[in-house]
Amino acid sequence: MRPTGRLHLGHLVGALQNWVPLQDRHDCFYFVADWHALTSEYADTSQTTAYAYENVADWIAAGLDPEKSTLFVQSLVPAHAELYLLLSMVVPIPWLERVPTYKEQQEALKDKDLSTIGFLGYPLLQTADVVIYDARVVPVGEDQVAHLELSREVVRRFNNVFGEVLVEPQPLLTSFARLPGLDGNRKMSKSLGNTIELSDDAEAVRKKVMRMYTDPKRVRADIPGTVEGNPVFLYHDAFNPNKAEVQDLKDRYERGAVGDVEVKQKLAHALNTMLEPLRDRRAALASKPGRIREILEEGSARARKVAGGTMERLRDAVKLRYR
Ligand code: ADP
């Protein structure tokens, strides 16, 4: 994850909730992609490290366990950059120009000059991030499969030139439900300002829910409302474990027999109940100053060891060996 802002409910359902159970089945590596943050945010890096610490606090709050997984910082493992450089020797520029997000993002972020080598090379750095750990699988949503396909092509090209030294990573498709924003926009996103952050307190969550976008036709509680595609009910489905309550609210909403206030109060309650254990774990972590830095230093040392082993093998393969 790129440390470019605070994490929100979208990150929880789209990434973290998939990452946590993998810890019991795989040897997992999760990292703060601070160099990737620079690809678009190079002009203002003043908050990058602060977001890095905040994000890792949220990871641990959500259930990532530094005893089970390696949690680290990309720039503390410089071998990622060395491998990126080696890969860049064999990868044709058009392969990168063809990546759909390349043009899309340049269009979307017009206020930034993204005609840089760093931005073009983003998917190549991603490839290095993955293959430097001989990763067999990468947990991704549908939308990232194209990037991973590029990584696989890059590995095949590299292996063609230097011998079978890199492992082709496979996508491990995670359930990927795109969470809409509080404003009804199709995606909850920090850049749209329509988020509930994992670090919001109970009162902030309640206030945001009370202001949520809902069926605009419904100016009075006795007007029948639409449940389908209504973000308030999408959130109820995603976060309220009391299915009977949700069904009852939906029935009454469609008949015009419930006020928006009741529907939203129950949603705020469900969200706060779900977030409470995350808040407790976050507070426990905050009571130990320096603990997150320590976790990242230990994780990065472990990552450097594994990455260093891979680079030894690659230096042999590329025949850059001086002795
Ligand atoms: P980036 O670092 O590219 O700006 P984001 O912060 O948008 O990325 O997202 C990081 C991860 O969180 C991605 O894997 C994405 O799938 C997931 N994610 C972000 N927002 C949502 C959302 N609204 N619904 C589901 N998943 C999301």
Image: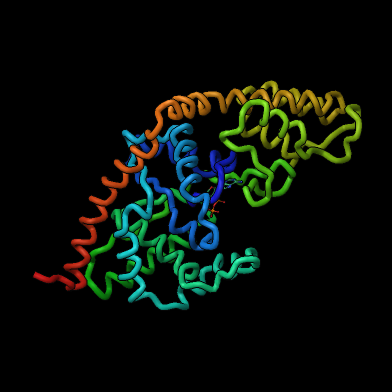
| Number of residue marks | 0
Q: Position of residue 262 (x, y in %)?
A: 78, 23
Tell me where residue 41 sits by quadrant. bottom right
Tell me where residue 130 sits by quadrant. bottom left
Q: Position of residue 170 (x, y in %)?
A: 38, 55
Residue drawn 65% across and 32% down? 237
Residue drawn 79% across and 38% down? 214
- Horizontal side of 80 relative to 226 (left or right) equals left
Tell me where residue 256 sits by quadrant. top right
Q: Is residue 167 above or below residue 227?
A: below
Q: Is residue 252 above or below residue 147?
A: above
Q: How is the image coloured?
A: rainbow
Q: Is residue 257 above or below residue 214?
A: above
Q: Position of residue 161 (x, y in %)?
A: 26, 75
Q: Position of residue 320 (x, y in %)?
A: 18, 72
Please identify the quadrant where the C terminus is shown. bottom left
Which residue is farthest left? Answer: 323
- Horizontal side of 5 relative to 287 (left or right) equals right
Q: Is residue 90 above or below residue 215?
A: below
Residue drawn 44% across and 32% down? 63
Residue drawn 56% across and 43% down? 6
